[in-house]
Amino acid sequence: MKIGARVLCSLLLAAPGALAQANLTDLSVALYAANPEAPAPPANWEVYRLVREKLGINLRFTMLPTGADGDNRLGALAAANDLPDLFEVRSLALFDRLVQQGQLAPVNSLLPLMPKRTAERYSNAQRNNLVTTNGQIYGLQEPVTLSRQYAIWVRKDWLDKLGLKAPTTLEEFFEVARAFTERDPDGNGRNDTFGFGGVIDFDTAGILPGLGLGNHFQWVYGAYGVAGTWNYNPKAFAANLRDPNFRRATEYIRRLVEAKVIDPDWATMRRADLRTRWQQGRYGMFFESVGGLQAGLQNFHANNPGAELLMLPPPKGPEGKSAMGTYSSAGWLYAVSKRAMDAGKGPAIARFLEWAHSGEGYFLLGWGRYKVDYTLPNNVPTINTQIPISVRGSYTQMRWLAFNGNPLEMRGRYPEINVGGRKYVMHQLMAQAQRQGNWIDRTGDLVVKAAANQADIERYVSENLVQFALGQRPINDANWGQFLSGLRNVRFEQYEEAAAKTLRESGYLK
Amino acid sequence: MKKRSLSPGDRLFEWSIDLFLVGVLVVTLVPLWYVVMISLLPFGKSPSLFLAPWDWSFEAYAQLVFQPTIWRAALNSLVLTLGGVAISLTLTVLAAYPLSRRELPGRNLFVGLILFTFLFNAGLIPTFLVVKDLGLLNTYWSVLLNGAVSVYNLLVMKTFFQSLPESLEEAARIDGANDWQVLWHVVLPLSRPILLTIGLFYGVANWNNFFEPILFLSDRSLMPLPVVLRDILTGLNVAEYVEGTAAQAAPAEALKMAAVVLITLPMLLVYPWIQRYFTKGVLIGSVKE
Amino acid sequence: MNPATAKSLAGHNGPATLVRRIWRYRLLYLMLLPGLLYFLIFRYWPLWNAQIAFKDFQPTLGVWGSPWVGLQHFQDFFSSYYFGQLLANTLVISLAKIALGIPPAILLAIALHETSRRFLARVVQTMSYLPHFLSWVIVYGILLAMLSPSEGLVNHGLRALGLEPIPFLTSTATFQPVVVLSEVWKETGWSAILFLAALLSINPALYEAAAIDGASRWQQVRHISLPGLMDVLVLVVLLKIGSILDAGFHQIFVLYSLPVYSVGDIIDTWVYRQGIQNFQFSLATAVGLFKGLIGLVLIVVANRLARRFTGSSLY
């Protein structure tokens, strides 16, 4: 009898385990590689084990290559109707298509299953509206944790050398730029410096480039009160380019180009070239993100001993307005494939996301191995930089799923560093860039659907503005009028009207 | 070996040829030299053609070579390249020879059908759908089979086979050889330059290929060298997301160029090795035309 | 004429004879089979999928089940405000690349073949084909370093001569030449390989006979080398004409910028911005088919001309 009871006991004890094994959900998660230079997590990653034991999920994680390659791959998987269960979408165009094609599942049912995460991330009605169609929410729209981190930086050591003050208005900016170009501030006897370095760049990372010359020049348009694509005027909605101030801002840029205070390669250079050049000490003022600055500081200080950088608030225009540009409060976007939802994987997905949101999951995904990849002095996650990123990085490839932007996290992500004899408190610089920039919230831009001939519209506007800026066409009434009336050729009015309608219906024009 | 002639016209000929070759060398070499110089750039120096040897920094190479992923990727590339060349050469030769025989019934039809696919390329998504339906996604076969035959290489080889003197094949056939034996014992030995050339073409295409691997392979451990190098370099470009975790040992440009040099280095070694077989006079002793 | 051919031509028509002919050449057909299978599976099956060019492709419905939209995507392409310019730029750049790209390659092949300094030949051969391996991103960096108006070597030289610096990469007058010439620089060594292989297959006895007859080296090149290249040359030119609407996407995508869109924007870069970036795969496929159609027409015409003037042709 005793033996029988013991056997029965062990069977009963084993049963839940066996049941749990049988209830294992296969979950395929695809995210863009957070650390492209590091390999995928190893097969014996602790997370895989924990997730299996605690959440009953058999996690299969694949990394999408960054940028267009990843978009292509996701697009190809979508076309083959073979989407992963939970995946990241970086292109709103793709997101819209997936919704249209019925390949995404509504996530409304998931939200109550991950209460803490939903309360902190998915409770903002405006953000949820961005991914809502016909009353159903189709995406997990994260709030933005990395945005508005761009600024104009100025060489304080050059200002001091030439006895100048940091410029606060457009006119002062022009004068300082001219001084930097003509008065040999680096003292090497050659005229090889420029007042301003910027390029034509539309690669969004936390800010919106708008229709025109891109991110690096939005501050000029902001100084004239016409930053961004649309004027968001409920009574007289129109694109900003119709505003006379838009022309004045463009004329200012033309002045910069004509006076040769801006690097003449600005119209063809890429961001990588801009970085190389400011690191070499070519520019007195340049446009750069806080992250980009951090990556280049070592090279910069090696090339320019004694240099000092200052963050410049956006210069004010003639009417006292200023803004670095526009931004949206939408961060990363995750979606669930319809197939996964139909297969009943919803609850598993919610469990996983909730686990990643805080506590053990948050630290494992966001920071890696405790006491190996990071430590927690004073509760501030501090990365162990002794381990190279190519090793460390494979343990934090899913960190964006975990990060939530809380202050301790930001201090860990943007620590204090010392380079070239100067101290840079990166998280303070981050906060400063966000605060000082006077950024204008234009989340509504994301709601406006792309026109059928969007590429042609963008080319028309940008190409014309570049021609004006380069002086290939003088900016006078006739030419500017031609530019505006030519908008008809790319059916711009229809695009404008559709935008007005969408924005009004979504409540952005009040 | 060419007979050296002493006539003034011929001497001028030789000198112009050699001058031209030196010119080509200079025009090619200067930019390549620039690439190497930038790969040796240390922190604190500007990119330039003239970097003093004592300033050279091999940090960029070190950082790349000691990446754990690089050696696995190099191995993957080797497998893909050698496997690809083997498969492609075999298929191409087997297809080119019959098509080079004018008496083959339906020959023009086949050539037309093949040429048609050269002009009408279905594109990314239609091809992806096929690979997926075949169940080849995330395997090497997807990359190897997808690019197995290049129409260009096929037609080039066919043209070469056509230009071989028919009398040789005639002689073999009179001796009782069948088509297979003619191909193997007569045609192929005479086609060494073209076989090596087409093999080189396929090899290079496979070695540098990154687009198909990115599209068809999802497992990072299967990725070949160009993809891994691309990833490393993208890491440099997305500094917005870097957030103080990537301290580099070398400037970004140096890393970019070092990656280029590393992936091009094998090419420097391959061609001279093949050149040994590029001998003139493969038809010595055969029938005069 | 080949006696085998004469025999087969003299045969009677009829299914029995056809079967007999196929049987006679069975080994050749067998050899051809793997290649044909490849084309069937990896070229024709995707072409079947390419019908999405005429459809509104819905992945959940599959290729066959998606609804027809006829020529809608083609219309979207033709009605672009920039269509004419795209077509013109593509054709001009392509033709210039063919016309200016092939002669240097032939010249280099001949030079490598004719020189008696073997060491020089091997060094030049190896060095000259290396640029082919540089990606256009790298070449762009080199071009920027050389042609930049502020710090490029070329403009340094111009300034030293007292001339105004020229913005090569952003001026509409110079962009297309930069595109064509940089491609020539990058590809000549590589293209020469094929012509060199062709030259090596020419019977050296021909050269010896000509030398004995008193021909100079120049004459030997003109009358033996060049005709020996003719078949390969015709092939290469015809194939390039067939892909004339591919003007080199990767290169232009890396090199072009807004100031030169009017001369640099080609069909493929437009498709990239409009189709790929917006995930409109049907549009991209449609344009691909359009390019194929134009290429087909041109190749048929060019082939006829080639046969008339040179005697060799593609088919």
Image (cartoon, coloured by chain):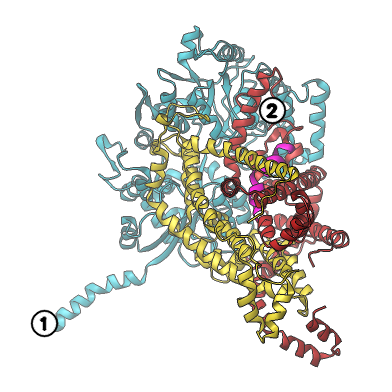
Residue span colored magenta: C176-193
Q: Nearer the viewer, residue C64 or C7?
A: C7
Q: C295 or A127, which is in the foreground? A: C295
- Chain letter for the cyan colouring in the rendering: A
Across and down, in percent, residue A377 comes to: 25, 36
Residue B250 x, y percent position in the rendering = 42, 35
Query: Is B41 situated above or below C293?
Result: above
Quadrant in the picture for residue C171: top right
User: Is residue C157 at all visible to an observer of this figure?
Assistant: yes
Q: Residue furthest bottom?
A: C16
Q: Which chain is red?
A: C
Percent position of residue A485, x then y: 82, 31
Label 1 element class:
helix
- State which chain is coloured yellow: B
- The residue pinned by badge 1 equals A2
Query: What percent of the width, then of the height, locates residue B6?
Result: 70, 46
The kind of secondary structure element at disc 2 is: loop
Residue name at image x 57 percent, y 55 percent: B211
Q: Chain of mark 1?
A: A
Q: Is residue A505 visible?
A: no
Residue farthest along the top direction in this orientation: A163
> Which residue is identified by label 2?
C167
Q: Which image quarter holds the C terminus of chain A? A: top right
Q: Is residue B245 left or right of residue B213?
A: left
Q: Is residue C12 above or below residue B136?
A: below
Residue type at mark 1: give it: Lys
- Mark 2 or mark 1: which is in front? 2
| Subunit of label 2 | C
